[in-house]
Amino acid sequence: MAVVHFSTDQRQHTGGTSEVTIDAANVRELVRQLAERYPSLNAHLVETSSTAVAIDGEIIPDPWLEALTPTSEVHLVRPLAGG
Amino acid sequence: MSTTEAPASTGTNGNGASGYRWVGTRPVRHDGLDKVAGKARYAADLNLPGMLYGHILRSPHPHARIVSIDTSAAEAMPGVKAVVTGADFPEAPPKGATRNLMCTVIARDTVLYSGHAVAAVAASTRREAKAAAEAIEVTYELLPHVLNIADAMADDAPVLHDNLFTRGVEPRPTEPSNIAARTVYERGDVEQGFAEADIVIEREFSTQAVHQGYIEPHACVVDCDQEGKAVIWASSQGHFMVRSSTATVLGWDTSRIKVIPAEIGGGFGGKTTIYIEPVAALLSTKAGRPVKIVMSREDVFRATGPAPGAIIKMKVGARNDGTITTAKAWLAYENGAFQGIAAMLGCMCVVSAYTLDHLYVEGFDVVLNRPVNVAYRAPSAPAAAFAMDSVVDEIAARVGMDPIDLRIHNCPSQGDPTPYGPKWPMIGLRECLEAIRDSDHYQSELPEGQGRGVASGFWFNIGEAPSATVNLNENGTATVITGSPDIGGSRASMALMAAEELGLDVHLIQPVVGDTEVVGFTDVTEGSRATFATGMAVVEACRDLKEQLRKRAAKTWDCDVEEVEWVDGSAVHGPGEQEPLTLAAITGNAKRTGGPLGATASLNARGAGPAFSVQVADVSVDQETGRVTVERYTTAQDAGTAIHPSYVEGQMQGGVVQGIGWALNEEYIYSDDGNLENPGFLDYRIPVASDLPMIETCIVEVPNPSHPYGVRGVGEVGIVPPLPVMANAVADATGVRISDLPLSPPRVLEALTAAES
Amino acid sequence: MSRTHVNCEVNGDAVDFLTEDGESLLNALRDELGLIGAKEGCGTGDCGACSIIMNGRLQCSCLIFAPEADGAAITTCEGLASADELHPLQQCFLEGAALQCGICTPGFLVAAKALLDENPDPTETEVRYALAGNLCRCTGYDKIVRSVLEAAVQIRTPA
Ligand code: FES
Ligand code: FES
């Protein structure tokens, strides 16, 4: 279980919803459920390559199997580039 | 090789990691001797038997359709062994990152910037290659071009890509434009925030595109054989990236390519991508000979980098007690010829050094007829900080508060929300602010006639995937092989962490950078990640080895492994019935106890710690020429634990000076016809020794709990504050606030004159 | 293609090589003699990475035609150390962490040697101006300047 927070851009694909609670044990499961619930959000995430996930403030690139707890705060973000 | 004392550097600390034997010391780096002796091999230093020289022909136009390319004259010239054009490369997909990479390496039907690669020649000598490249006849149909953000965003602007529709605008536009994407971050209600404010300041800022300015031009040697295999010697920030990108551009399987990392002569982000390797590979394939391509400095300026210019509008509200109530920001960043994420990053960074209940940040990524952006140290953050921290400085003056106290008053800490959503982990901004406030420099009286400026800066830092292999040699020494190119002394850091783990003298450890066939996949050295992420892999491999060493000791003693402890580089028998076994004793006997010892670790590094820097400078301004002289400079940066303090200081100082260059002098100057007018170090002036004072450093060590030694990553954030620091110091010295960079003598003089009249 | 035969002394050794007329001394040193210490950062005399001492003067080898070296005495970075000891400048650069990527280092060492040969006791400002023709993008110059000052002390007062 986890609380997913949507950014302003993402809200355009969630019907304006800014957060949703998803019953998922890990990130892969969470992403799967989000894709079912908000089909156009998934396309948006793919288009923006938003494959990173911030869990409780820690940005993790590509974390399929990262475990989620009922209090996990999740943000779907784009992996960052640096110098 | 000796462990030296800290050099006489004022304000230096970096010894907070007490309790460590090796971490936090300053040994001479392992690759240092070759570098001072002139023996270190960079990519351009390699010559192979039968090697040809490649030369790339570049577009003289900023935007044009390639009607035809006639290579027949070039092919007939003396010494010419191979010629390639875009038609020799696989077709690019219609859009996306792959297309951008493929079409940056060589133009297909359209050139999108002056300097865009169009064709290439391999010949026996440099001069033959150049002459032949110039004999290639390209017929262009000129197209209208756009060179700056305002022109590119205009409704009637000539469009670079007819399949680019602005993302982030609903409904999605049906007409193509140069606005690639719109990004928005918001929280609370900015109007309420302004209503709560006693003062509101609204300003517009601009910064210019700059180049990373690494002293080593891009270079590679590629040797392709008759079986279709390629060996590439390249100067890059990531040889696995060179392998995968080259394979992508050529449509080859990665297993055909081996990349051997040469020493790299500076990158700063600019060598996180490729330009020349696939071209050299095709030339080499065609000619059946090794091919070397070395870019000229002019080509480096015209066709690589840059970091983007930006326009940023800020509106910030604050109460008389110094509380910043809200910020509204509009940012537009140049992307170059292809879409990037510069504005998105700018949006994430612009107000990150402040806690705000209400914010609205909107950013636009804009394509135009310039070379495509590449990362440059903390990409996008410097321009964003310039805007925000200039306004914050004005607020401090208006409410009559010390600018550092005001920043401390508004400082975020762990658990506060970031502007882009997630909560802050443990961060060291407050500690950096306090370090500067308490520094000798800030406590000193400002000399007559000078101005003082302060500012802060933020950057994310990045983890990603590293690999490391640690082998113990039969004589008790260790070899640490990682996949991270060493761009600033990271090999020494790897050796220090391995020394600490194994309890082995750091001088008995040889750190090397392995090629793509000897070490596991490792992401690019970027995002300040080498010491952080690759260091984690080194530590993990060493911990594995310590387990193995304990088991070998147990076998030697015929006891239970639980009875063996690893202490200071030796196996110690808990019950005390045996003499300790040193690492060398175990490795010397390794065959009898199960064979040589080695361990490998590969991982997806988690928990890169956000980095902050706070800086202060004193400047004087020549009223007659407008020249700004930096009189004194101090930087504080949260480094987590400083593994090798000298190189941490070096990263801090180097970043600061690059930022000073961006603030005071550096800029791309384009002519109206779209050509870069200053593609050389004479006219694109980076700071030299006589422009600068010593850069005093203050390493703040707030350990990153996600790293075994608390490393946070130090490479990037130092470049962020100097832009606002310089602007704030000049404003303090002259009473005139300039919001367009660079603060070059003509611009400063113009502003001073305008203020007088 | 016509090639010129050039005789000169490099780091104390008599050497000779063939070169094309328009070739730079920098390329000749690197390609014909295998002395890769001098680097090309710009090829236009603006970065100092190719610094050498020729007939006692600090020069950008990228601006000299190779045939001009005929009869000259040249010192490159490779010629600074003796068989068993680094030059104090090299030792101080190592210990003072005056290099990061190291591409500018040979040029700085040669330029600093030219300075200390002329002026064994320079001030910080003199060091900064003497090295103003050498670009370093990594270090911000701080540790380079400190290391040159330290080397000057060591050369003046041998242990
Ligand atoms: S290469 Fe000679 S000065 Fe730059
Ligand atoms: S150490 Fe890299 S340019 Fe000087």
Image: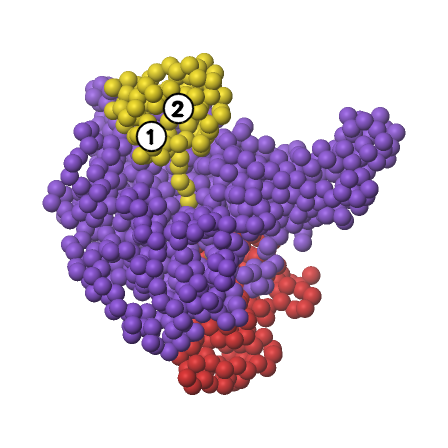
Residue pictured at 60% horizontal, 38% vertical: B601
Q: Indicate the amino acid at tag 1.
A: Leu
B226 sits to left or right of B558: left
In the rendered structure, which amino acid carries the disc numbered 2? Val
Residue found at x 82% / y 42%: B592
From the image, state the color of chain B: purple
Crowding around mark 2 (Cα neighbors within 10 Å: few <14, some 14 to 19, many 20+) is some
Residue B35: give x, y in percent of width and height: 56, 59
Q: CA distance from mark 2 to mark 1?
A: 10 Å
Q: Colour of chain A?
A: yellow
Q: Is residue B629 above or below residue B721?
A: below
On residue B198, which mark appears?
none
Say which residue appears at 46% left-offset and 49% top-offset. Answer: B253
Quarter occupied by residue C24: bottom left
Q: Secondary structure at mark 2?
A: helix
Query: In the image as oriented, which residue stretches furthest toward the front?
Result: B227
Assign a secondary structure to mark 1: helix
The residue tagged 2 is A31
What chain is tagged by disc 1?
A
The answer to the question of whether label 2 and label 1 lie on touching residues, with beta carbons closer than 8 A, is yes
Q: Nearer the viewer, residue A82 or B210?
A: A82
> Of marks 2 and 1, which one's residue comes earlier in the chain?
2
Badge 1 is on which residue?
A45
Query: Is B574 placed left or right of C64 in the picture?
Result: right
User: Which one is in front, C157 or B155?
Assistant: B155
Residue plotted at (68% across, 68% down):
C83
Q: Is residue B467 visible?
A: yes
**Residue C120, percent across and down?**
56, 66
Q: What is chain C's hue in the picture?
A: red
Q: Quadrant of residue C129?
A: bottom left
**Quadrant holding the N terminus of chain B:** bottom right
Q: How many marks?
A: 2
